[in-house]
Image (spheres, rainbow, N blue to C red):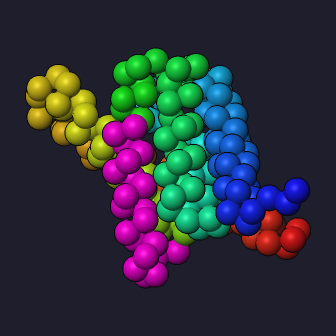
C-alpha cells in the first residue's frame, strides 16, 4: 500500500517543523543557562531566533511562524513561565510579521531583516508591558532596547547567514 503524495508531503512538513522547533527549543534552553547578565533587564542574545530566520529563508513564512509559536509555548512552559511566554509571543509575532514583509521586498539582506526583527521584538515586548502596567512611560526604555535589538539582530543575522552557507555547501 502506497501513501498518497499529500500525506507524504504533510509528514515531511511535520518532521521539518519538529526538527526546527527542537533546535530552537535547545537554543532557548542554552540561552536560559548562559550566565549572561548585561545589567539591563530585557536584554537577551536571542539565539533561538537564528532558527526562526533560517526557517523563514529556507522553508517560508508558514514554517517560521509554526516553529516560532511552538518553541515559545514550550519554552514558556519549561523555562520562562506564563508572563515570559506572553512577552515572547508579543515580541515574536511583531518581529516575524516585520521580517516577512521586509524579506518580501527583497531590499534587505538576511542580516538587515534579522536586525529589524530584533528591534521589532523589543518593541512588541514594550507594547505588551505598557498594556499590562498601564503606563506608557516604559517607552523611555526603548532607546536602550533599540540598540540591543540592533546588535542582537545583526549577530543573529550573521550566524544564520553562515549556517545557511555551510548547509548549502554540505548538500
**Which quarter of the figure has residue 139?**
top left
The answer to whether residue 138 is left or right of residue 164 is left
The x, y position of residue 157, in whole percent, is 57, 60
How far from the left and from the top, in percent, is residue 144?
32, 42
At horizontal 38% and vertical 47% (from top left) the residue drawn is 93
Q: Quadrant for the N terminus, please.
A: bottom right
Number of numbered discs overlaid on the protein picture: 0
Residue 104 is inside the magenta segment: yes
Q: Is residue 165 magenta?
A: no
Is 34 on the left-hand or right-hand side of 166? left
x 61%, y 58%: residue: 55
The reply to whether residue 27 is in sight is no
* Picture quadrant of residue 89: top left
If the image is split into quadrants, where does the C terminus sit? Answer: bottom right
- Residue 121: x, y in percent? 38, 47
> From where the camera sits, is residue 99 visible?
yes
The residue under the point 43% across, 62% down is 99
Q: Compare residues 137 and 160 and report the one nearer the observer.
A: 160
Q: Which residues are magenta?
A: 89-109
Query: Which residue is depicted at the point 43% across and 65% down?
Result: 100
Pick out the residue farthest to the front.
1
Viewer-nearest residue: 68 or 98? 68
Secondary structure mainly formed by the magenta segment: helix
Residue 158 horizontal/vertical position (percent):
62, 62
Q: Is residue 122 found left or right of 70 in the rendered image? A: left
Between 140 and 52, the residue placed more toward the observer is 52
Residue 93, above or below 113 = above
Amino acid at each position: 500500500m502506497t501513501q498518497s503524495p499529500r500525506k507524504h508531503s504533510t509528514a515531511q512538513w511535520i518532521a521539518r517543523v519538529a526538527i526546527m522547533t527542537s533546535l530552537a527549543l535547545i537554543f532557548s534552553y542554552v540561552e536560559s543557562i548562559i550566565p549572561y547578565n548585561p545589567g539591563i533587564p530585557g536584554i537577551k542574545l536571542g539565539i533561538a531566533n537564528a532558527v526562526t530566520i533560517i526557517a523563514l529563508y529556507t522553508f517560508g513564512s508558514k514554517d517560521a511562524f509554526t516553529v516560532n509559536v511552538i518553541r515559545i509555548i514550550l519554552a514558556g512552559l519549561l523555562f520562562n513561565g506564563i508572563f515570559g511566554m506572553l512577552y515572547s509571543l508579543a515580541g515574536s509575532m511583531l518581529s516575524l510579521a516585520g521580517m516577512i514583509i521586509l524579506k518580501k521586498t527583497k531590499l534587505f539582506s538576511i542580516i538587515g531583516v534579522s536586525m529589524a526583527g530584533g528591534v521589532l521584538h523589543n518593541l512588541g515586548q514594550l507594547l505588551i508591558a505598557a498594556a499590562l502596567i498601564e503606563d506608557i512611560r516604559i517607552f523611555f526604555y526603548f532607546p536602550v532596547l533599540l540598540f540591543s535589538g540592533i546588535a542582537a539582530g545583526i549577530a543573529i543575522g550573521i550566524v544564520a547567514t553562515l549556517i545557511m552557507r555551510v548547509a548549502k555547501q554540505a548538500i
